[in-house]
Amino acid sequence: MCSNQTTATDFQTLMADISDPVRAAHCQRFFKTGPGEYGEGDLFRGVTVPELRKLARRWKSVPFNEMLMLLQSPYHEDRFVALCLLIHSFQHGHEDAVYCAYLDYLPFINNWDLVDISCHKVLGPYLFIRPRTLLYTLAQSRNVWERRIAMVTTYYFIKRDQLTDTLALADLLSNDREDLIHKACGWMLREAGKRDESVLKAFLDDPSIVLPRTALRYAIERLPAPVRKEYLKQRPKISPPNHMPRWRAYQHIMTATETLKGNVVFTPIIECEKLSELHSGTVYLKLENQQHSGSFKYRGALNKLQSLEDLPHTVASTGNHGLATCMIAKDLHLDQTIYIPSTTDAYKVDKLKNHGADLIVHGKDATEAEQKAREVANQKGYAFISPYNDWKIIAGQGTIGIELFEQTGPLDYVFVSVGGGGLISGLSLALKAHMPNVIVIGCSPERSNVMQKSVEAGQIVEQPALSTLSDGTAGGIEEDAITLPLCMDLIDDWETATEDEIGRAMRLIYQQHHMKIEGAAAVAVACLMKYKKDLTGKIISVIICGGNISDERFENVLSDEALSTANGFNRVN
């Protein structure tokens, strides 16, 4: 047995004694170490893998710093053993240290067998309970081994029936130039198919997916011969307009999380003890009212505007979305026109003017203003920034879900206000990829719940525009809204709140946390307060989506008498 003082040098001396030059020469050919090959310059000792694993089991007591010295060896087998030792250290309580070291020493994990024995045993379990944005950064690396690490890490998720990252990364890497990446993608897709063949077939059948031949052959290996033959036939695939499979939408959220990092507020969460006591659970408030522009809308607008290559004149519409777009356009030195309905509150009009927006009043509600804004944008060749009906907007809003997962870990319930559906769609896509069992509750005012009614009907429905304190969620939905099928697929339950209940929720948050929230945010709180299912012991989050409300209006809400006669609050999104 080795003592705690055993060093990397001691180990290398032992390895040199058992090396086999003939086997070493064979390994150097097998692992492509020639000029221009993927393993160029790598050195081998000629020790078999069973021997290496046996040595690693004997050397578990090697100090951590010596493991890292061994990982920097020029010999392939030494690095193999170092990774085995690091995996053992990870599995015995040193997760953070090994994870950080793994990333710091990525240049030494530089062949497919080193990648394949280690990444799903270190990065996999570490990221399983954390946001996985690292994998999407690695997948876009210029280094082939980092791209392979991104793909093979998902093996850990697959074995725990979380398949979304595998599909998203296989899609992202489908145009990769390296055959080694094609093989890794096909291998992981095959493993996903073992867990759920229907998921694999749905992926392969998707009209937007075109896999390299090698990846496809690996992916379908376990399917019956006639099925394999059909998949190998070259057939043109035509995607329907606005088609976006769930895994690709999730992929865009992960990319947006990295893109927006440092440019949006990583908004805090706080526990609301009153709501926790009410349901005998733990209730966290995610404070998007502390986001730039005072609402979650800033995320989607920034993600969209940053994606525009030529950054033309932009056109948007209505309150919180218009305000966010206006602020970003000003920072980017863009011309910006905002269309608002005649019923827009003076407080939000003043905020838009203060940010230099060119305001045009059109229509009596947000739907009419949005339609006019899109019409003008199409006519003049401007960029229309939709408040919800755009994949970039949805991806930006979905970054809230990644933050929330990092802050709280697994959740049982999430309560989210619903207007056009951009927030709840992006949030649900992000959360359900990491915690498939989370229950997402769509929350709307009783006086304006168009999305709920549309989901129930399976198509966009019209609803009379009634005044509501939840002005940010009120109004209609565009006929071609991409959020409708997402809401139908992702929302698990619905709840509505009366105007009195919304007002009580606003007052509760003010009394408990000395914080003003707007009616749209209070809807989610109100729906939680009246939710009838047993939430005992559950971990719950409520998205406080915005805080843009004038002092005067808020003072009126604080008065019970004024609340009962509240009127004139039309949607300003």
Image (cartoon, rainbow, N blue to C red):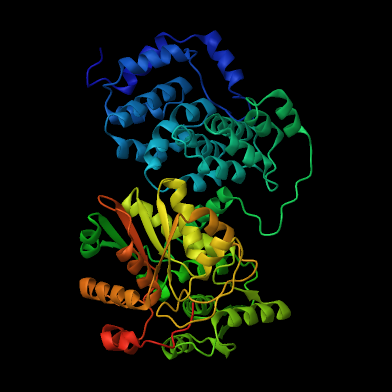
Q: Is residue 98 left or right of residue 177?
A: left
Q: How many marks?
A: 0
Res. 334 visible in picture: no
Res. 301 visible in picture: yes
Which one is nearer the viewer's eye here, 179 or 300? 300
In the image, residue 58 lies at what x, y percent?
31, 15
- As drawn, 160 above or below 506: above
Which one is nearer the viewer's eye here, 157 or 254? 157
Residue at horizontal 57 percent and vertical 90 percent from the top: 361
Residue at horizontal 33 percent and vertical 20 percent from the top: 9
* Quadrant location of the N terminus in the rendered image: top left
In the image, residue 154 lies at what x, y percent?
49, 37
Q: Is residue 344 left or right of residue 414?
A: right
In the image, residue 17 lies at what x, y percent?
40, 9
Residue at horizontal 38 percent and vertical 66 percent from the top: 265
Which one is nearer the viewer's eye here, 272 or 351? 272
- As drawn, 177 above or below 309: above
Residue at horizontal 22 percent and vertical 55 percent from the top: 280
In the image, residue 215 lies at what x, y percent?
65, 33
